[in-house]
Amino acid sequence: MITGKSDGATLCLTLMTYSGREHSAMSSETFMPSGARNETDVFAVHGADPEVLAYAMAKYSRSALSMRESLAEISAQRAEQFLNTFYFQYGHRSIADLAHIAFAVERLSLLAAVVLVDEQRWDGQERSTRYQNFIKSGWFFPDFAGDSASAELYVNTVRGLFATYDRTTAAVHDALRQRVARPEAMKPDAYERTLKARAFDVARYLLPLATNTSLGQIVNARTLETQVSRLLSHPMAEVRELGRKLREAATGPAWNVSGQAGAALVDKIADPELAAEAANLLTREVRTAPTLVKYAEANQYAIETQAELVQVAAGLLAGQRIADAPVVDLVERTETLEVELAATLIYSASHYSYRQVRDLVAALPEARVNEIIEVGLRHRGRHDEALRAFHAGAALRFDILMDVGGFRDMHRHRRCVQIRQDFTTLHGYETPESGDAAGLAEAGIMDDYKAAVEAAHAASARIAAGSAPEAAQSALYLLPLATRVRCLFKMDFAEAQYISELRSGPAGHFSYRRVAWEMFLAFQRQHPALAKHIRVTDFTKPIDVLQR
């Protein structure tokens, strides 16, 4: 069948080439070989349920029907039967790539949001800490299982951070007004919005990971299934509950944007039969992915492997001091692929830099390196994808130590492999100093800022030592966005070029502008001839504060 199509295409190409060479005076309409068709049809599709549309698209490989013909004959029931057979029994997972679903996820913590969006195939938008005041967002309160002392400390710490956030926003905003004059061509409201955004750039460092946010995501069902399974495998109760709610939202009735208007229209129809027909079209219940994610469960491979890797890493790194590291370290490739895999696995379960771990693993006997790799794969089930750490071999490996707020911006770059370590207080925190906008010192609140962050870190440590079942996890909610986190970014040249150029621009937040600049400098040191092709903005040069 495939050969026949190939031969037919070759014959058509030969005839058309001959026609053009020997009959140049003839148009393609004058000479058209039998079977040749030039009328390409392109049309957008709207209104089909995601799983029905996925089935219709999958039929291109199994039927000669057009999309219009396929959608006209497919029902939700037939789509479910098809997906049960080809998706679950035969393992044709690419079919789920064709079903795209939009979700609104509201009132989840910043911590849960970081976990939720950690998908390489993900599209969405989250509330911006740069453009919105989060003072009224609310915050997540974990279950302390009767540990009233920890609960009280948690509440007081969160409230203290929010109070300092509010004072910082106002103080920096006032300092900016005194420092930056409004140009005559700039409208007062635009001037105020811009200065307020710059003030939020500084104040956001004080937002705890408990802070509520909201986001929208559009993902295909295959990504959703992986996402739900990953969330259900997480040690934090809020994240596991989020996984259950996502699964329920996909398999249960979806919110119909036009449902209320449709119901009102149906009520106006006097003819009962016509009203029933209209109701079926306008107000029927739609379940976006009732089949494709219904079996999504916690991933035992990930759970068991992570627990074992933590033990292996602890034993291997016992007695090792966490070495000092720069903000950005471009770790040159000197190790074998096997050492990279083992080092990345250990890195993911520790708080040490990639260079320190890599050098330590590289000195191990080959058999020990292979044992570590085996730990990462021994629990892998039949349908499990290998852990992200096995996405190895990229030419450029940037080990970045930055504030959590800045990381959340860098997190959006999904064309690279990201290996984030767990949040911790071990790396300290950042003090926001942009050099371009009024900061803590100019606003006179440096001491207030440091006291709030250090109090939050101390409270987090006390709660982690408490008696609640998830005390160590609950304590992480108190960490402000100023807290440093380490993440390994593996990428190719095009992505390094893109990040350096985009993130170093003057309109960006000074945290990731600094990281992008340091990435460029690190790349320039190792590849000076290629660095000249990167259109980076020098972070050390002054910028126009009013440029957004």
Image: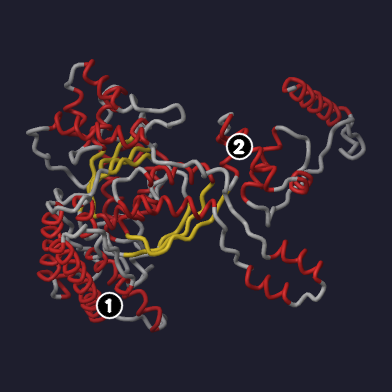
Q: Is residue 429 visible to us here?
A: yes
Q: Position of residue 435 (x, y in %)?
A: 21, 64
**Relative to 464, is 547 above or below?**
below
Q: Which mark is residue 123?
A: none
Asked where in the image residue 157 lies, by quadrant, the reply is bottom left
Q: Residue at x 28, y 58 (%)?
A: 405
Q: Position of residue 481 (x, y in %)?
A: 24, 59
**Relative to 358, is 525 above or below?**
below
Depth order, front residue of 534/360: 360
Asked where in the image residue 509 lies, by quadrant, the reply is bottom left
Q: Residue at x 12, y 42 (%)?
A: 324
Q: Is residue 411 visible to us here?
A: no
In the image: residue 456, left or right of residue 520? left
Depth order, front residue of 302/213: 302
Q: Amino acid at mark 1?
A: Val
Q: Which residue is mark 2?
A: 84
Mark 2–mark 1 Cα distance, whole angstroms, equals: 63 Å
